[in-house]
Image (tube, helix red, strand yellow):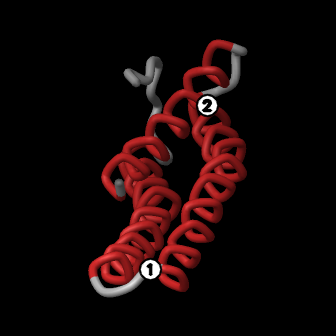
Amino acid sequence: MTVGMAVDANVLIFSRIREELAAGSSIQGAISAGYDRAFVSILDANVTTLIVALILFLIGSGPVQGFAVTLSIGILTSMFTAILLTRSLVNLIVGGRKIEKLWI
């Protein structure tokens, strides 16, 4: 479940970047706007999943509570990496360079 949520976050981000590039934005502008526009969708999906994990933890017992804890840790970790880590890496690689085309 956690892997699926992490993949979903990255797909959302890169889809938004593609949309911005198709609309004629510069590469840096498209990257910035793509991350900014995808953040709300990612936050919504992850908060909803965390609420479900909380409900599972409160209602469930034993293995279900363990799944809820594992799911919560995974969601928080994937959200951190999708928003902060990938944005940092993309800006490190692309930032300040003259790039004519971005292959996403």
Amino acid on which the number 1 mark rests in the picture: Gly
Q: Residue at position x 43%, y 50% from top?
A: 5
Q: Is residue 82 left or right of residue 20?
A: left
CA neighbours of label 2 inside 10 A, class few (<14), some (14 to 19), many (20+)? many
Instruction: State the separation of the CA atoms marked 2 and 1.
Output: 37 Å
Whichever of callouts 2 and 1 sits on the residue coming sooner in the sequence is 2
Residue nearest the observer in this picture, 47 or 28: 47
In x, y percent, where is residue 52? 57, 66
Find residue 44 and report its image quarter.
bottom right
Find residue 94 and report its image quarter.
top left
* Residue 103 drawn above or below residue 42: above
Q: Is residue 63 left or right of residue 22?
A: left
Q: Secondary structure at mark 1?
A: loop
Q: Which mark is residue 94?
A: none
In x, y percent, where is residue 20? 66, 24
CA neighbours of label 1 inside 10 A, class few (<14), some (14 to 19), many (20+)? some
Amino acid on which the number 2 mark rests in the picture: Arg
Q: Which mark is residue 16?
A: 2
Q: Is residue 44 left or right of residue 101?
A: right
Image quadrant in which the N terminus is located: bottom left
Looking at the rendered image, the disc whose residue lies closer to the viewer, 2 or 1, is: 1
In x, y percent, where is residue 18? 56, 22
Which residue ends up furthest to the left in the rendered image? Answer: 63
Question: Are discs 2 and 1 less than 8 Å apart at CB?
Answer: no
Q: Which residue is mark 1?
A: 60
Residue nearest the observer in this picture, 17 or 77: 77
Image quadrant in which the C terminus is located: top left
In x, y percent, where is residue 15? 54, 27
* Residue 40 drawn above or below residue 22: below
Q: Residue at position x 39%, y 77% from top?
A: 73
Q: Secondary structure at mark 2?
A: helix
